[in-house]
Image (spheres, rainbow, N blue to C red):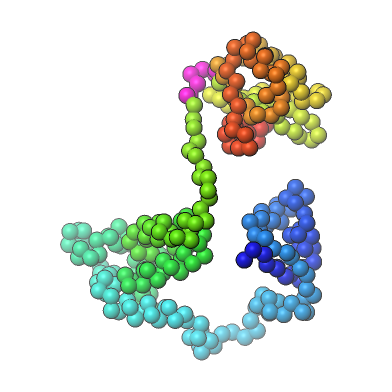
């Protein structure tokens, strides 16, 4: 669905969901809501509460307590099918018998069919004819393929599907089955990102303090600062920019830091205009330090300086 409509009876949400950007929202709870919804393309509209009947009714507590007939009607048909299968499946029959009578003292005395359950024997129980592992239903062999299809119906990817399974169902090697199922799904392969992230390259660890450093600019309370941090100890120096954050101001600040801590073997920065200016390049050429610039449009590659900015 390329676009859809979200209808609410709470008028202030309309502006937040449709118009405001993340920086304009002050409340953290609303910021998190806006961030989670950022991946969807929708338009929020308002409807008066008395006309917003169905969601309004579903959000209210029931007037009367449920009757036995209501509780029986709420049972899912899949629960009844699973109960019937559990009575016929040899593995489930043997597993229930082992749970009710007790597992043997040694694994060698256990039926080979139940070997994968040995490490979980303290978590297994029988509830209403079904085997459960903690709060997760142990799915019989013949229902596992259908269960995989239900878990994968929303196509949320391997890790999210595994998290969903860990909340509801279990069988031996369920994580591996989920990986194989999604790996062979043609629709999932079609919509994979075209450019996978490459593994982060790490440089050689420095042998002394201020042998390798990182630098970056940041703004706070209307003022601009330069942070210069050691990659071994994490010790930061902070220099306030008095005027414009220019290459000349950068060279002046770096010269003072080099005089205080020594010339680093290499310094890593992003590709900002101050760091890539000709005056800065000539400064590093004269002083002899190896200036390394991070990948453009990829702040994680300058993560050490980014983390120092956050800490400062």
Q: Is residue 62 above or below residue 147?
A: below
Q: Residue, x 56% and y 25% (percent of image)?
A: 231
Q: Quadrant of the N terminus?
A: bottom right
- x%, y% of residue 216? 67, 28
Outermost left residue? 109
Q: Residue, x 30% and y 79% (percent of image)?
A: 87
Q: Nearer the viewer, residue 249 or 117?
A: 249
Q: Quick check: is 122 in the magenta stretch?
A: no
Which residues lie in the magenta part? 204-211
Q: Quick check: is 206 in the magenta stretch?
A: yes
Q: Residue, x 25% and y 64% (percent of image)?
A: 114
- x%, y% of residue 150? 46, 69
User: How many numbered markers are drawn?
Assistant: 0
Q: Residue, x 23% and y 65% (percent of image)?
A: 113
- x%, y% of residue 239? 72, 23
Along the horizontal axis of the image, is 233 left or right of 103? right
Camera sees residue 114: yes
- x%, y% of residue 182? 43, 59
């Amino acid at each position: 669905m390329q676009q859809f409509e979200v209808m609410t009876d709470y008028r202030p949400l309309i502006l937040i969901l449709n118009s405001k950007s993340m920086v304009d929202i002050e409340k953290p709870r609303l910021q998190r809501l806006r961030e989670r919804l950022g991946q969807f393309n929708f338009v929020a509209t308002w409807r008066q509460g008395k006309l917003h009947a169905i969601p309004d009714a579903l959000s209210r507590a029931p007037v009367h307590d449920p009757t036995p007939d209501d509780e029986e009607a709420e049972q899912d048909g899949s629960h009844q099918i699973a109960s019937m299968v559990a009575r016929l499946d040899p593995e489930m029959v043997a597993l229930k018998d082992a749970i009710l009578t007790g597992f043997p003292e040694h694994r060698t005395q256990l039926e080979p069919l139940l070997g994968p359950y040995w490490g979980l024997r303290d978590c297994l129980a029988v509830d209403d004819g079904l085997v459960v592992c903690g709060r997760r239903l142990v799915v019989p062999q013949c229902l596992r393929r259908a269960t995989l299809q239900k878990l994968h119906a929303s196509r949320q990817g391997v890790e999210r599907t595994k998290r969903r399974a860990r909340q509801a169902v279990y069988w031996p090697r369920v994580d591996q089955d989920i990986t194989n199922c999604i790996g062979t799904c043609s629709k999932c392969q079609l919509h994979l990102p075209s450019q996978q992230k490459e593994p982060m390259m790490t440089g050689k660890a420095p042998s002394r303090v201020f042998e390798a450093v990182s630098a970056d600019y940041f703004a706070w309370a209307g003022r601009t600062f330069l942070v210069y941090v050691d990659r071994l100890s994490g010790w930061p120096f902070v220099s306030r920019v008095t005027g414009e954050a220019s290459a000349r101001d950068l060279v002046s600040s770096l010269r003072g830091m080099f005089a205080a801590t020594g010339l680093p073997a290499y310094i890593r920065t992003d590709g900002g205009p101050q760091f890539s200016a000709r005056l800065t390049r000539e400064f590093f050429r004269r002083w002899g330090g190896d200036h390394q610039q991070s990948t453009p449009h990829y702040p994680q590659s300058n993560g050490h300086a980014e983390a120092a900015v956050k800490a400062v």
